[in-house]
Amino acid sequence: FDNLPDKSKFSYIAGDDTTTRSLKKLLLNRISAFYEDRNVVRYYAKKMGIINKIKEAGSATEPLPLYIAISAKTPNAQEIADEFDIKIRRLRKSGQLEKILRKYNVADWK
């Protein structure tokens, strides 16, 4: 925060529930934008009933791959990872994944 060019144009927020607090500040015109993962914002905006009152301004970076971690000490780690991949593909093919993601207003990562 100390390295920002003009501190009067930036607001720093920390602590618990920063996304909800940022959305409330946005609705009250106390800020004009904030930086957060799009899926996190979509989830909280839907939960707050304001999904149609906000719009995405853009992205600072290209999407990055998402990984799950399974301890190497887990005897069947590779089997678990393979099963996860298979089940995600099945959910996607059947349309169930889309239904699950829609419930949280989250986009498919494929």
Image (tube, rainbow, N blue to C red):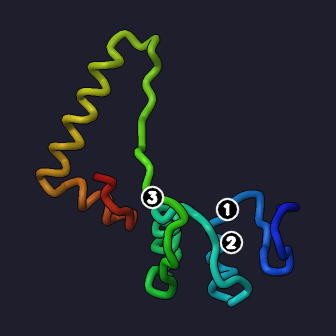
Residue at the extreme front of the image, as rendered:
5
Residue topped by disc 2 = 21
Tell me the amino acid under the disc marked 1: Asp
Question: Residue 86: horizontal and vertical position, in percent?
Answer: 19, 35
Contact check, label 1 and label 2, Cβ < 8 Å:
yes
Determine which of the numbered discs, if any, sits on residue 62 in the image: 3
92 over 23 or under it: above or below:
above
Q: Secondary structure at mark 2?
A: helix
Q: Nearer the viewer, residue 58 or 82?
A: 58
Crowd band around label 1 with a 10 angstrom C-alpha radius: few (<14), some (14–19), many (20+): few
Q: Which quarter of the figure has residue 18?
A: bottom right
Q: Secondary structure at mark 1?
A: loop
Q: Residue at x 46, y 69 (%)?
A: 42
Residue topped by disc 1 = 17
Q: Residue at x 24, y 61 (%)?
A: 99
Q: Residue at x 77, y 66 (%)?
A: 13
16 over 57 or under it: above or below:
above
Tell me the amino acid under the disc marked 2: Arg
Could you tell which of marks 2 and 3 lies nearer the N-terminus?
2
53 over 102 or under it: above or below:
below
